[in-house]
Image (tube, rainbow, N blue to C red):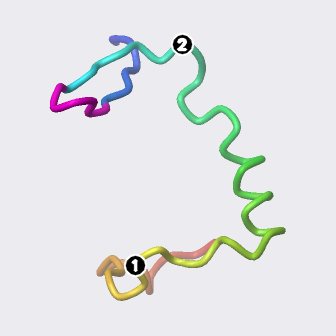
Amino acid sequence: MGDSVELRIEEGRIIIERVAGPARKGWAEDAQRLAADADDGLAWPEFGNDEDAKLTW
């Protein structure tokens, strides 16, 4: 299996860099912070996924 990479565009170029740490490091803490700040609403609520109604959390 290969390395995880990050893709981004800078000044019209595609930059590909190896991810140094776990790709999702810090996501849980950021999700908790967003929820505490009431900033966890959908960015584009009108564009849901077809399967969203079937999800269980």
Q: Is residue 12 magenta?
A: yes
Residue 13's tag is none
Q: In percent of the image, x 59 and y 23: which residue is there?
A: 22
The amino acid on which the numbered mark 1 sits, given as a three-letter code, is Trp
Q: CA distance from mark 2 to mark 1?
A: 31 Å
Residue that sits furthest to the left in the current view = 12
Q: Quadrant of the N terminus?
A: top left
First of labels 2, 1 by sequence position:
2
Residue 14 placement, left or right of 7: left
Task: Give the quarter of the figure containing the C terminus.
Answer: bottom right
Q: Is residue 20 left or right of residue 14?
A: right
The spot of residue 31 in percent (x, y) is: 70, 57
Residue 3 drawn above or below residue 40: above
Q: Residue at x 54, y 12 (%)?
A: 20
Q: Main secondary structure of the magenta part?
A: strand
Position of residue 13 measured from the top left corner of the image (x, y, whole percent) = 17, 26
Indicate whether 49 appears above or below 18.
below
Residue at numbered disc 2: 20
Instruction: Choose between 2 and 33: the one closer to the eye.
Output: 33
Of all residues shown, which one is farthest toward the front? 11
Residue at x 29% of width, y 81% of height:
50
Q: Which mark is residue 44?
A: 1
Alpha-carbon neighbours of circle 2 within 10 Å: few (<14), some, or many (≥20)? few
Question: Which segment did they paint magenta?
Answer: 8-13
Tag 1's secondary structure? loop
What's under tag 2, amino acid-wise? Ala
- Labels 2 and 1 touching (C-beta < 8 A): no
Q: Position of residue 44 (x, y in %)?
A: 40, 78
